[in-house]
Image (cartoon, rainbow, N blue to C red):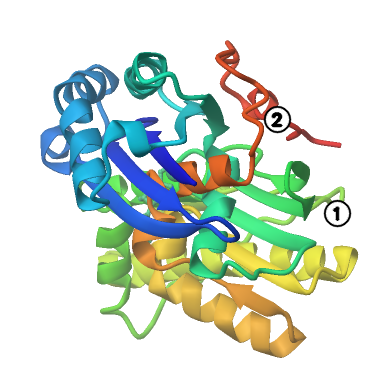
């Protein structure tokens, strides 16, 4: 079983091959970053993102096949991110992957990007035990998801305003750190030994939802001039919020496996804090290696590995939200 995955939902043009008869195994993964294109603008410019995807998508797909030493004929299934993401960007990867599928008469699988972030954990540890609790923290999403089995998900909590990565990016901008904000802010935070105390939002109704916009405002309105202390305080507050809700969700679901995924999971402070939580409450923690946390196509191919029938065929959902996925939904 050889699966070609394609990802183009935001600012990464990616293709990968995942193979394996009994377990998914990563064979090749190519990621072409658009950082240099968006950096002068301080954030992702959707139109430029789509144009860059168009320019590189076929090369990236060909490179993934070449690295896997496979020909298009050897591919059994083609998958691409159908959403959520920037519509213009999504269309490029979807069209390229569907054209490949049509040309070589292969089944096509549209994949939900957030579900795929969780799937990255199965590439890291194929023998992962279910049910599991996953925290997906990325530029577009912050969600606590209970995964009972493949294709069955329940969203326990989600952000009510900014996503965690979005908050990182906005605060990085406030601190004049440029784009991409997350890694830059993390580096700056490391330089401070006296983090500013910033508020960690709690939901009045006791839900497991998140809110990060107040934290961003607190940074904007702070009179502290030490930027590293602000960055460290911000990071501490984000980690406290994520850890706090994950701990509550673990108690609620009694899940024995915890997955931390999405671009923000590349943050070393967060990885360490989850490591500590895992030891404290004795759950098996899986955090994919950094290259599988930030956007990549290996996770897309892996999601299609677990969706063997490609039962959605060529149908690509018009709505690119969670509802676009197979059985994903709140409830
Ligand atoms: O999953 P991802 O690559 O793309 C989306 O699906 O959104 O996540 C990108 C997000 C960005 O907001 C970026 O700032 C954040 O992940 N990020 C980080 C770090 N590396 C990437 N946030 C905090 N610390 C990092 N080291
Ligand atoms: Zn992502």
* In-front residue for pair 287/178: 287
* In-front residue for pair 106/179: 106
Disc number at residue 65? none
Q: Position of residue 325 (x, y in %)?
A: 66, 29
Q: Position of residue 319 (x, y in %)?
A: 60, 15
- Left or right of 203: which side holds 183? left
Q: Is residue 211 above or below residue 291?
A: above
Q: Position of residue 144 (x, y in %)?
A: 69, 52
Which quarter of the figure is the C terminus placed in? top right
Q: Cβ of disc 1 within 8 Å of ligand 1?
A: no
Disc number at residue 206? 1
Mark closer to the chain start, 1 or 2 = 1
Residue at 21% from the left image edge and 51% from the top image edge: 67
Please say if the residues under marks 1 and 2 sit with CB atoms less than 8 Å apart: no
Residue at 24% from the left image edge and 25% from the top image edge: 49
Residue at 39% from the left image edge and 37% from the top image edge: 75
Cα separation between marks 1 and 2: 29 Å
Residue at 49% from the left image edge and 38% from the top image edge: 140
Q: From this viewpoint, is residue 64 visible? A: yes
- Left or right of 323: which side holds 75? left
Quarter location, residue 54: top left
Please tell me how crowded label 2 is: few (under 14), some (14-19), or many (20+) other residues with Cα within 10 Å. Answer: some
Disc number at residue 326? 2
- At mark 1, the secondary structure is loop
Quarter location, residue 148: bottom right
Q: Is residue 268 above or below residue 214?
A: below
- At mark 2, the secondary structure is loop
Q: From this viewpoint, is residue 222 visible? A: no
Please tell me how crowded label 1 is: few (under 14), some (14-19), or many (20+) other residues with Cα within 10 Å. Answer: few
* In-front residue for pair 64/74: 74
């Amino acid at each position: 079983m050889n699966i070609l995955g394609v990802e183009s939902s935001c600012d990464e043009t990616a293709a990968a091959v995942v193979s394996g008869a009994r377990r998914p195994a990563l064979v090749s993964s190519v990621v072409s970053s658009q950082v240099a294109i968006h950096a002068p603008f301080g954030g992702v410019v959707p139109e430029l993102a789509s144009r860059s995807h168009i320019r590189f998508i076929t090369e990236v797909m060909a490179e993934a096949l070449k690295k896997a030493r496979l020909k298009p004929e050897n591919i059994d299934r083609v998958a691409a991110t159908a959403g959520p993401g920037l519509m213009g960007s999504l269309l490029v990867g979807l069209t390229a992957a569907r054209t490949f599928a049509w040309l070589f008469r292969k089944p096509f699988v549209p994949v939900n990007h957030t579900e795929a972030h969780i799937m990255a954990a199965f590439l890291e540890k194929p023998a992962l035990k279910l049910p599991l609790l996953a925290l997906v923290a990325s530029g577009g999403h912050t969600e606590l998801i209970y995964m009972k089995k493949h294709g069955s998900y329940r969203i326990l909590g989600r952000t009510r305003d900014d996503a965690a990565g979005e908050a990182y990016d906005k605060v990085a901008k406030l601190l004049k750190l440029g784009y991409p904000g997350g890694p830059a802010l993390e580096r700056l935070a490391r330089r401070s030994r006296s983090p500013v105390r910033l508020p960690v939002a709690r939901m009045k109704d006791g839900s497991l939802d998140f809110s990060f916009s107040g934290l961003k405002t607190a940074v904007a309105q702070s009179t502290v001039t030490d930027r590293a202390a602000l960055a460290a305080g911000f990071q501490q507050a984000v980690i406290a919020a994520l850890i706090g809700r994950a701990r509550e969700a673990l108690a609620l679901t009694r899940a024995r496996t915890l997955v931390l995924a999405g671009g923000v999971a590349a943050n070393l402070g967060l990885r360490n804090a989850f490591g500590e939580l895992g030891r404290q409450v004795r759950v098996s923690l899986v955090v994919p290696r950094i290259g599988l946390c930030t956007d990549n196509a290996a996770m897309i191919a892996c999601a299609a590995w677990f969706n063997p029938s490609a039962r959605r065929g060529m149908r690509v959902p018009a709505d690119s939200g969670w509802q676009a996925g197979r059985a994903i939904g709140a409830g």
